[in-house]
Amino acid sequence: MTTGKIVVVLLTLYFLYLAIFTAPDTLLTWRRILQSARQSDYTFMLILSALLIPANWGLEAWKWQVLGQKLERISYLRAFRSVMVGLTLGFITPNRLGDYAGRLLELKSKERLEGIGAVFMGRFCQLVATVLVGSLGLLYFAVLLYWENYPAICLSVFFLLLVLNAAMLLLLFNARAMVALVAAVGPLRRFTKYLAIMGRYTFGEMNRVLVLSLLRYFVFLLQFVLLLILFEVRLNPVEYISGVSTAFFLKSVVPSVSLLSDLGVRELSAMYVFGLLGQERLQVLSASLSLWLLNIVVPSAVGLLFVVRLKLNRRGGGA
């Protein structure tokens, strides 16, 4: 990693340390929070959140099936397997770059490297969903906390978010513009052939992928809300949705090079946002870490089985 990336990682860890361990008796308080959650009447919330794991990654597999069809015919089961392999490899690489390799390895096409553009479109579409919903959450906080004293700043934020959302939607539904932009930059021109597939998706196909991305986003949001309830974060429905969507938005726009799938950035974002609503940081942290364990660690462990199978198939000459 470059020096800049190392600095980002160290700063993230440092701020996370300041946010958690500077208060006295932090570990004792955290232990009480975890014990209270185990004995809570809301323990079933953890079970419900866990039951949504297949829905989360099942929707991602559906997205990949739609996007991958431009290269070769992919069954849903093979798309799901590709996603799991990508998740496992992405878990141990900065910015989940291993996700690209994992999905491409499962393709049979000789032009599999062109699938880089397909993977990128899937990730970009999920980012668009995060920005669309997160912008509404951010506006809620702007009006709630700052409108009375800083209306001009709030209007400026509204305008910037409007421009950001419009720009992202235009790029999503006119991906040829992104390819042309890459081709116009000399050092990046050689990558154009790997991204050319992005310009071949129709409006209908991208609309379908965006809907799937939004559905997956709301599954993820629901999981987080359930875990917040479990750890005794008590808010009204609008505050839950606004808080979670804003935390996801901040996590997505803050540069991250974590080796553990953005661990740290998400937690800092969530603690900051829910702190504005008067919630205890350790309770929010517990919910955020549980979300990470359920949606990243557990599926990544399951994905190891698919990685091993893939290696055995390659060694044996199978597909």
Image: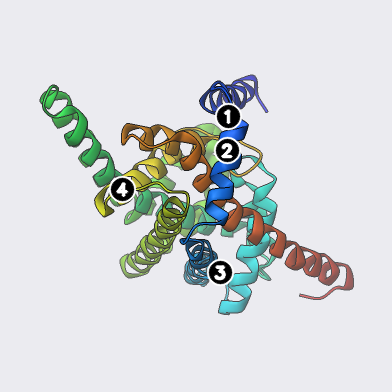
Q: Which residue position holds label 3?
A: 71
Q: Which residue position holds label 2?
A: 30
Q: Quadrant of residue 273?
A: top left
- Earlier-in-chain disc, 3 versus 1: 1
- Amino acid on which the number 2 mark rests in the picture: Trp
Q: Is residue 311 left or right of residue 286?
A: right
- Amino acid on which the number 4 mark rests in the picture: Leu
Q: Position of residue 180 (x, y in %)?
A: 41, 45
Q: Nearer the viewer, residue 76 or 177?
A: 76
Q: Quadrant of residue 16?
A: top right
Q: Which residue position holds label 1?
A: 26
Q: Calculate the distance from the C-alpha at mark 3 to the C-alpha at mark 1.
A: 52 Å
The residue located at (50%, 57%) in the rendering is 40
Q: Quadrant of the C terminus?
A: bottom right
Mark 1 touching mark 2, by CB under 8 A? yes
**Tag nearer the camera, 4 or 3:** 4
Q: How many residues crowd mark 2 within 10 Å: few (<14), some (14–19), many (20+)?
A: some
Q: State the SS at label 2.
A: helix
In the picture shown, does residue 4 fall above or below 40? above
Q: Position of residue 290 (x, y in %)?
A: 56, 51
In the picture shown, does residue 46 fall above or below 261? below
Q: Which residue position holds label 4?
A: 235
Outermost residue, right side: 316
**Tag nearer the camera, 3 or 2:** 2
The residue located at (50%, 48%) in the rendering is 287
Q: Calculate the distance from the C-alpha at mark 1 to the C-alpha at mark 2.
A: 6 Å
- Amino acid on which the number 1 mark rests in the picture: Thr
- Earlier-in-chain disc, 4 versus 1: 1
